[in-house]
Amino acid sequence: MMTASRVSPSRESPPDFCQPHNSIGGAVGLAALVSLAAARFESQTGAVIATAQASVDSFQVVFWVSAVMLFAAATLSLRLPALRQQTDLAALVH
């Protein structure tokens, strides 16, 4: 025999990817990377390089820029909790 239980819906906040500021930040970041790729592509095609090679070069530049940005974000995310704890301790001392 199967019984049904009443479960009230929880009023939790939506996941982080649904937040508008994350969507806007992602859109702005993507626009910056696309602009960088387009600028690199234009500079490469002006140098009489094949279109396919210019496209690959522009994607490589954008890949490395985004890799550096992600590394910096990961480093900050690991470092910030320690800094917050130091400032909390400093506030308690004073």
Image (cartoon, rainbow, N blue to C red):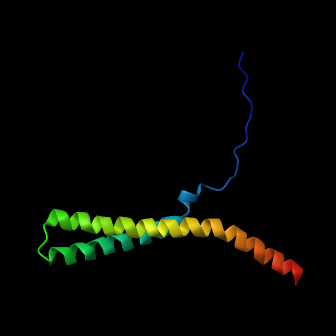
Identified at 71% across, 19% down, the residue is 2
Q: Quadrant of residue 55?
A: bottom left
Q: Residue furthest bottom?
A: 94
Front one among 65 and 4: 65
Q: In terms of image quadrants, where is residue 42?
A: bottom left
Quarter holding the C terminus is bottom right
Residue name at image x 60 percent, y 70 percent: 76
Using residue 12 as the reference point, say whether residue 15 is left or right of it: left
Residue appearing at x 14%, y 77% in the figure? 47
Up/down of 15 relative to 92, above or below = above
**Residue at the outermost top position:** 1
Provide residue 16's location: percent of width, then percent of height.
Answer: 58, 58
Q: Is residue 47 left or right of residue 80?
A: left
Percent position (x, y) of residue 40? 26, 75
Whether residue 36 appears in this view of the structure is yes
Spot occupied by residue 14 in the image (x, y as percentages of width and height): 61, 55
Where in the figure is residue 43, as x and y percent of width and height?
Answer: 21, 78
For image coordinates 83% across by 75% down, the residue present is: 89
